[in-house]
Amino acid sequence: MLAGIVFYVRIIGLRSFSKMSSFDFAVTVAMGSLLAAVTISGSSLADGLAGAGALLLVQTAVAYGRIRFGASAVVDNRALLLMAGSTMLEENMRWARVTADDVRAKLRQANIHRYDQVRYVVLETTGDVTVVHGEGELERDILDDVVDAQLLFDN
């Protein structure tokens, strides 16, 4: 079964396990669950491979739909600004069910020593938290898909 999944991924590509979106993450979890179910239940290898192939084909179709038909609005979350500079955005944090303690933990992981070092913090579509610090001008297009990113430019 595992060899079959590796074969599928080689054909379809690494996006299969990239977790670039919530849909990709769900497919990755489903694939692991499918592998476990086939291994434990004694289901046939053919059934397991058919299920894995179906999952990867749906993921490929959705990825194609994102590119050609704008399906991202339907299947993906939007990235959300959690901090603009040193200001935590309480309403966005409440919407995302993220606490100030969660954000502070991510700041420490990013080697932030003072709030004034923070440029912005984003909750990404995958659930990862990105902490950006450093100097230089922000390019708007990097933040095009981030909810409330305009707060970083409204000065």
Image (spheres, grey):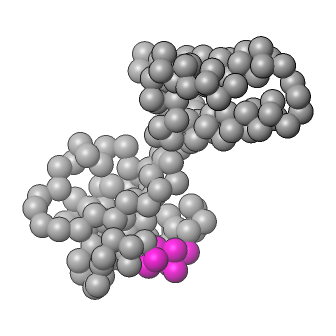
Is 90 above or below relative to 55? Answer: below
Q: Return the x and y of residue 16 as percentages of the image width and height.
A: 52, 29
| Residue positioned 52% across, 67% down in the render | 93
Q: Main secondary structure of the magenta part?
A: helix
Identify the magenta region. 99-105
Along the viewing direction, whichever of 134 and 3 lies nearer the viewer:
3
Q: For the view shown, which residue lies furthest in the bottom direction? A: 114
Q: Return the x and y of residue 102 as percentages of the image width and height.
A: 52, 74
Q: For the view shown, which residue lies furthest in the front direction? A: 3
* Residue 150 seen in this snapshot: yes
Is 108 above or below relative to 146? Answer: below
| Residue positioned 33% across, 55% down in the render | 149
Q: For the view shown, which residue lies furthest in the right direction? A: 41
User: Along the horizontal axis of the image, is 2 left or right of 9?
Assistant: right
Q: For the view shown, which residue lies furthest in the left direction? A: 136
User: Along the horizontal axis of the image, is 112 left or right of 134?
Assistant: right
Q: Quadrant of the N terminus?
A: top right
Residue 100 lies in the magenta-colored region = yes
User: Along the horizontal axis of the image, is 115 left or right of 34?
Assistant: left
Along the viewing direction, whichever of 98 and 91 lies nearer the viewer:
98
Residue 83 lies in the magenta-colored region = no
Q: Return the x and y of residue 7 as percentages of the image width and height.
A: 55, 19
Q: Quadrant of the C terminus?
A: bottom left
Q: Return the x and y of residue 35 as percentages of the image width and height.
A: 73, 33
Along the viewing direction, whichever of 41 and 133 lies nearer the viewer:
41
* Residue 62 seen in this snapshot: no
**Quarter-wise, where is residue 112 in the image?**
bottom left
| Residue positioned 43% across, 16% down in the render | 68
Q: How many marks?
A: 0
